[in-house]
Image: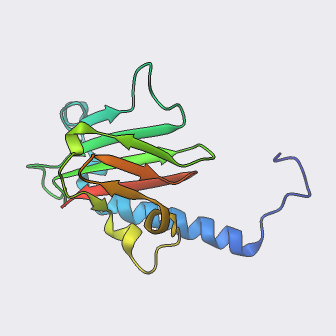
Amino acid sequence: MLSDASIKPEPAQIRWTRDAFLDLLRIRASSSLFRLKTADEVQRRLRWHNTGPQQQPTLTAAELDGRGLEGAGFQRLIYFINAGLGSESLQLDSARGLPFVLHPVHRGAAAADRRPVEAAGFDSALGRFSIPPRSALVFVLP
């Protein structure tokens, strides 16, 4: 596809991609959880979800524990990358009953990618996250 000269992004698509990437960089900068310094910290704080034989192959999901970490900004956060063409949902028993919300950058009026606000969701009673297609997003536990 990349060699097809008829496929050329328009300036608006280029700007949107740049701005969406800058949003992801703002999310990364918002918490020291995205910049853990040692392998031991990663092993203690990172937990993978959606693994094993029943996993949804287009969905990556992981949780970072910020309790006691300077600059974490959040007790916990769960990030998702949905590489698929359709929406995905993932139910996590460990999230049931907790007040997870979309990261403040996603909720901000200036966010380039509106899909998280418009199509992502979290049902606390079930612990179920909904993730729009072709998106990367973060839910946080303040």
Q: Nearer the viewer, residue 96 or 139?
A: 96
Q: Nearer the viewer, residue 71 or 80?
A: 80
Q: Nearer the viewer, residue 85 or 110?
A: 85
Q: Quadrant of residue 23?
A: bottom left
Q: Is residue 18 left or right of residue 99?
A: right
Toward the front, the furthest residue is: 125
Residue at (25, 44) in percent of width and height: 64
Residue at (52, 54) in percent of width and height: 132
Toward the top, the furthest residue is: 53
Residue 137 rendering spot, x and y as whole percentages: 42, 55
Q: Quadrant of residue 15?
A: bottom right
Residue at (44, 23) in percent of width and height: 54
Q: The N terminus appears in which quarter of the rendering?
A: top right
Toward the bottom, the furthest residue is: 109
Q: The C terminus appears in which quarter of the rendering?
A: bottom left
Residue 55 rendering spot, x and y as whole percentages: 45, 28
Toward the left, the furthest residue is: 68
Give above or below for 139 relative to 83. below
Residue at (26, 51) in percent of width and height: 77
Q: How is the image coloured?
A: rainbow
Q: How many marks?
A: 0
